[in-house]
């Protein structure tokens, strides 16, 4: 349910803004089920290659099935920690032509160092692109989810404040994202905004809880407790008049700098 409304449109738009073309080699870091990796594979065609890397083999398996259904043989879904990823031998020595990270960079421990390292796997003149939630996107629903979960899980109530310190907060405006991308050794930075205001149906809201990082709010709860959270959340959403989920997203793309010529 989240793919057609959320991950899919963003993945497609990121590949478009990156300008991925026929024959390119692309690294899709934190690729999940392939929301951007699959459109990238369609863009690079049979002479190109896409490496989709993620920690979740369940999501990767979904991506493999989509690729198989579309007869795409130019994409590898690899289960690995992308902070340790090295380009395999089918990538040109100079590096990947493009790096895509859709809604993933802010999960990486030591985000700045991890991103700089990934940028280093792209050839000079190659392209890098990330998507991140814009400041305040999802905030009404996130507040409701966290408050409801905290009511049902004293353990989560203790942990919840730490999620406000997510590194996402440092890059969730156009200016902040632009500055951050440039600091990672890039130029020609462009940040665009994709407005995505989705009707807040009960199914969509629950899919967001179950299918994003928010699921950690449910960890340690048994099936009965999870059902109570679900019901309480539906009532809270109605009581607060939350009719729309604001999934507005920033798309930041840039070109990797060439190293200065030797003196
Ligand atoms: C919100 S999902 C986005 C998935 C996909 N890019 C999309 O747009 O549908 C974030 C993904 O980052 C992955 N992830 C987080 N840390 C990672 C790491 N160190 N190495 C690889 N994947 C990671 C998670 O497993 C998860 O699938």
Image (cartoon, helix red, strand yellow):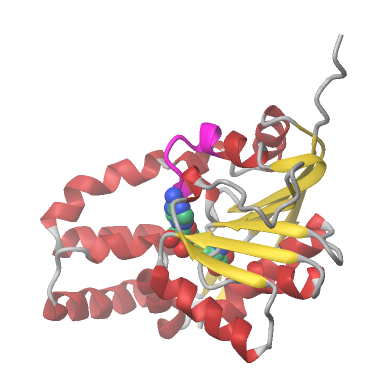
Indicate whether residue 112 is drawn in magenta.
yes
* Residue projecting furthest to the bottom: 69
At 84% from the left edge and 20% from the top edge, which residue is drawn? 260
At 69% from the left edge and 36% from the top edge, which residue is drawn? 181
Indicate whether residue 38 is drawn in magenta.
no
Q: Can residue 246 be seen in the rendering of this structure?
A: no
Residue 170 horizontal/vertical position (percent): 54, 36
Give 186 or 150, whichever is nearer the viewer: 186
Residue 165 horizontal/vertical position (percent): 39, 38
Of the 4 image quadrants, the one containing the C terminus is top right
How many numbered badges does the structure rendering display?
0
Residue 236 to residue 101: above or below: below
In the drawing, does residue 259 fall left or right of residue 116? right
Give 201 or 40, whichever is nearer the viewer: 40
Give 79 or 151, whichever is nearer the viewer: 79
Q: Can residue 182 be seen in the rendering of this structure?
A: yes
Residue 161 to residue 81: above or below: above
Q: What residue range appears in magenta?
A: 107-114
């Amino acid at each position: 349910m989240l793919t057609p409304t959320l991950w899919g449109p963003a993945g497609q738009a990121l590949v478009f803004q990156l300008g991925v073309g026929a024959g390119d080699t692309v690294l899709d870091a934190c690729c999940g089920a392939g929301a951007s990796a699959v459109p990238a594979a369609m863009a690079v065609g049979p002479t190109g290659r896409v490496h989709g890397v993620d920690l979740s083999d369940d999501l990767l398996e979904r991506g493999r099935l989509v690729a198989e259904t579309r007869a795409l043989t130019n994409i590898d879904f690899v289960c690995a920690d992308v902070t340790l990823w090295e380009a395999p031998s089918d990538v040109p020595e100079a590096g990947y032509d493009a790096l895509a990270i859709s809604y993933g960079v802010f999960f990486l421990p030591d985000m700045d160092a991890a991103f700089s390292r990934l940028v280093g796997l792209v050839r000079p003149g190659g392209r890098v692109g990330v998507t991140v939630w814009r400041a305040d996107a999802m905030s009404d629903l996130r507040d409701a989810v966290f408050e409801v979960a905290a009511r049902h899980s004293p353990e989560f109530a203790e942990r919840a404040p730490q999620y406000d310190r997510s590194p996402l907060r440092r890059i969730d405006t156009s200016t902040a994202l632009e500055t951050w991308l440039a600091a990672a050794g890039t130029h020609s930075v462009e940040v665009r905004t994709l407005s995505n205001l989705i009707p807040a149906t009960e199914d969509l809201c629950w899919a967001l809880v179950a299918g994003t990082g928010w699921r950690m709010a449910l960890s340690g709860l048994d099936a009965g407790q999870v059902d109570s959270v679900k019901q309480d959340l539906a009532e809270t959403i109605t009581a607060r008049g939350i009719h729309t989920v604001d999934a507005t997203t920033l798309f930041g793309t840039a070109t990797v700098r060439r190293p200065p010529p030797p003196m």
